[in-house]
Image: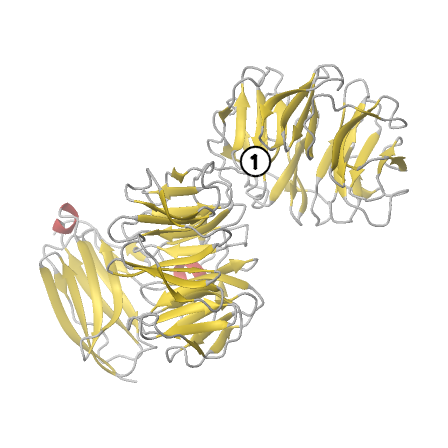
Amino acid sequence: MKSAVLFLTILLSFSINSNSQNFWQPLNGPNAAPYISQILTNSSGHLFAATHSAGYFRSTDNGNSWVEINTGTDGPNMEGGRYIGVNVNNDLYAAIDNKGVYKSTNNGNSWTQTSFINAIVSSFTFTPNGYIYAGTPTGAGIYRSTNNGANWTHVSNGLPQYFTVLDLASAPNGTVYACTGNTNKVMFKSTNYGLDWVPISLTEFYTCKAVVNNSGTVFIGGSYNNIYGIKRSTDNGVNWVNVNNGIIASRVNYLYCDQNNVLFACLDSGLFRSTNNGDNWQRIVNNERIYSFVKKTSGEYFAGFYRKGLFKSTNNGVNWQQSNNGITSINAGSVSIGRSGNIYIGTEITGGFLSTNNGIGWVQILDPGKYPNVNTILETPNGYIFAAADSGLLRSTNNGANWNCIYYVIGININALIFKSSNELLMANEFGVVRSTNYGNDWTGLYSTYSVNALAINSSNHIFAGTTIGVIRTTNNGVNWSEVGGINQNVISLAINQAGHIYAGTYDDGIFKSTNNGNNWVNVLNIPAHFSAICINQIGNIYASGFYSGVFCSTNNGSNWVQVNSGMYNHFVPSIALNSAGYLFAVTYGGRVYKSTGSTIGVENISNEVPEKYSLQQNYPNPFNPATKIRFDIPKEVRSQKLEVRLTVYDILGKEAAVLVNERMNEGTYEVTWNASDYPSGVYFYKLQAGDYTDTKKMVLVK
């Protein structure tokens, strides 16, 4: 006998109890980067990009590729950052949401936490004497450091008791300007390095953004009651003039001035440039929302486009090409696994993505220009792909190359989509449930009383729907529906295990469980979280995710739960999914795609022998209560023939009780633990199938 015996332990202890590795690992991609909140360059020409909540990235090759700088030997996970600053010494200062300010002296390879308060930071500015100023958008005010971030002082004399800092800017003479969100139409300035602040009255709007050129001229962009524009002051803010000639009025997102006093304005209406101190503007990017900008000393432009990520121009803005390679930040709303193992990601703003290699590489299958918002994606057994988008229900019959809209109602969002059997689909929306029996060509209504958020089907073909008033059920394929159990909560997710037990995730009241087809329910996880997704692996372990709470796991049918968030910064997790090998995938809103570091059914290689033939061994112990182990051998021919291996448990009547394995497997010896806590005492049979091979043995559960 030759190499490789594999041991299948279907336990979660490796991931929940082990301190040696994180439960989650971020995947490389998709490279969507919808929100580049800031981009800057240092004196070495390195580029640094801040994303909405996936943290920071660096490019040393002029934006051709990017690498994460979100971890380091001295710092934490930096994925919560969205603003960054650099001083004349090339020291980086990064804001981490509610964790303050971190500093790096080696281009982001490692980070150390400064003594800044645990607050959100909205802006940095640096004065010529080396002082650092940080503003907060949550009323905490403005802080100053005079020793490179080692210590920070609250500098608020003359400032309101509560105000929002939207931007900070400093002049060559050390004057600091603070843009605030006050409705009093004022901004503030300090001429003594933040010791005192005086108001600057603005007659038309409150300021959003500011920049000061090398001559000390101040430019501000702002709005008030749909009045938008840019103003200029040449006397330190005493007098202001409007400088909007050529500007298409819209919200000002960012102002930038290069070393030659060329101005750039990032607006919702495009990117504008002025070479004459703001007297005239030329629009160099049309009809795109621009959020961030930097110009390198070598002349290249980099701009953050709304919905599209980072773009680069090498000819003064005449032409642009994407520069997102390596920046992995998406507003994902859903992840799903196809029956072929394909991974689908539906996003807000950036369309839909497909990976055919477990998340190593991604391709865009739904163009954000046509289909920006994708709620969910479903692959059916015949290979059709369905996508719920703003533009309706889409269908592709050629692996996502082309799409056709097959269902559309103006203003109606599709909340859930599941495959029932044969060619039958069920779809849930704000008006109820509809059904198609021909892969979406035609639809008929099944239910239309309450808005439906989630759907699930048990082994008896009973359909359960999560609605705004609880769970409803039909036992006759949608002819009649009844409210069951009396949860009386907004149910936004449903899942059913192999024993028929139903789990319902609610909007704000935890997770409920029913063991009698929905007739009665008990709250098994009573915390105020929005549990938008529940999935159950082959051995009955339950995973639930939601907004703000991250991911929870129960290995005992919901009796106890633990959080499994290690390795994942952003705990806003709208969707999770399991593949056939037991790997768990998760998406975070405004962040990343994650994969569990190990299979949730734990495959481990512990030997170097290969079986010569198939073999199914007797379970042990037998009789058992409540768990037993089943060992089986898979020879090398399984790989060459690309066979599916299936290990199934049946009750005494021949009804399928549990599927323990259902996937392609390499040669080896495997051991599976079946936990029958949810099953009654009695005789059971377990059957191994692979190609033409089949074998069945008996076991006895005694409680």
Which residue occupies 9% across, 57% down?
Answer: 613
Res 52 quadrant in image = top right
Q: Residue 147 vs residue 4: left or right?
A: right
Q: Indicate whether 322 appears above or below 682.
A: above
Q: Secondary structure at mark 1?
A: loop
Where's residue 70, x and y in %? Answer: 55, 40
Q: Residue 163 vs residue 610: left or right?
A: right
Q: Residue 610 vs residue 405: left or right?
A: left
Q: Amino acid at mark 1?
A: Tyr
Q: Is there any visible trace of residue 462 in the rendered image?
A: yes
Q: Residue 465 vs residue 215: left or right?
A: left
Q: Residues within 10 Å of mark 1 (few under 14, many from 20)?
A: many
Q: Indicate whether 451 appears above or below 412.
A: below
Which residue occupies 44% across, 51% down?
Answer: 334
Label tally? 1
Where's residue 324, x and y in %? Answer: 49, 31
Name the quarter where the C terminus is drawn: bottom left
Q: Coloured how?
A: secondary structure
Kindly identify which residue carries mark 1. Answer: 306
